[in-house]
């Protein structure tokens, strides 16, 4: 079925879409979570242990360092974890998403971190 919108109606629909998106972003911002906290959250939700990530990430030491935030996640590891957790790889790459200051991260829309529970 073809759209029977006029050019003006299409322009109005595009404008309304943009206004709604801008409103949502301003009124309901979604704070980003650092990669190691996202992994911990996904593991908790699935009832996984660090040992179960060894086959995805690598050695026990690598898993430990990544989960503690001492080591960044490499792009190949991010791809493997994205496939494992069935999420976007960007969630696991530091700097791929703009991270707010730690005090701004404690919202109801983010996984709980140690900072937010204090």
Image (cartoon, rainbow, N blue to C red):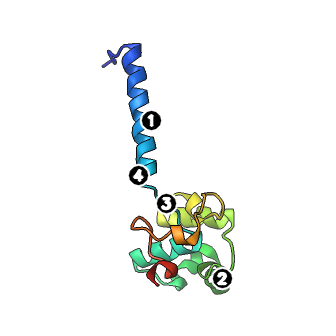
Q: Which residue is mark 1?
A: 18
Q: SS class of the residue under badge 3? A: loop
Looking at the image, which is closer to me, 41 or 49? Answer: 41
The label on residue 87 is 3
User: Taking 14 as reference, is 89 left or right?
Assistant: right
Disc 1: CA contacts within 10 A as few (<14), some (14-19) or many (>=20): few
Picture coordinates of residue 70 (x, y %)?
68, 80
Residue 13 position (above or below residue 82): above
Q: SS class of the residue under badge 4? A: helix
Which mark's residue is nearer the viewer, 4 or 3?
4
Q: SS class of the residue under badge 2? A: helix
Q: Earlier in the sequence, mark 3 or mark 2?
A: 2
Q: Earlier in the sequence, mark 2 or mark 4?
A: 4
Which mark's residue is nearer the viewer, 4 or 1?
4
Disc 3: CA contacts within 10 A as few (<14), some (14-19) or many (>=20): few
Disc 4 from disc 3: Cα separation: 25 Å
Q: Earlier in the sequence, mark 4 or mark 3?
A: 4
Q: Which residue is mark 4?
A: 27
What's the residue at 47%, 71% (across, down)? 106
Indicate the quadrant where residue 45 lies. Answer: bottom left
Picture coordinates of residue 82 (x, y %)?
54, 62
What's the residue at 58%, 63% (across, down)? 100
Q: Earlier in the sequence, mark 2 or mark 1?
A: 1
What's the residue at 59%, 80% (across, down)? 67
What's the residue at 48%, 84% (across, down)? 49
Residue 54 position (above or below residue 24): below
């Amino acid at each position: 079925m073809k759209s029977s919108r006029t050019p003006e109606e299409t322009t109005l629909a595009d404008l309304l879409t943009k206004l709604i998106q801008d409103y949502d972003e301003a009124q309901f911002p979604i704070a980003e979570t650092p990669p190691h906290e996202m992994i911990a959250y996904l593991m908790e939700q699935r009832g996984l242990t660090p040992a179960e990530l060894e086959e995805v990430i690598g050695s026990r030491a690598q898993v430990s360092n990544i989960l503690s935030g001492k080591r960044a996640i490499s792009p190949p590891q991010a791809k493997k974890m994205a496939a494992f957790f069935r999420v976007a790889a960007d969630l696991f790459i530091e700097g791929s998403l703009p991270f707010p200051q730690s005090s701004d991260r404690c919202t109801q829309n983010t996984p709980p971190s140690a900072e937010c529970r204090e």
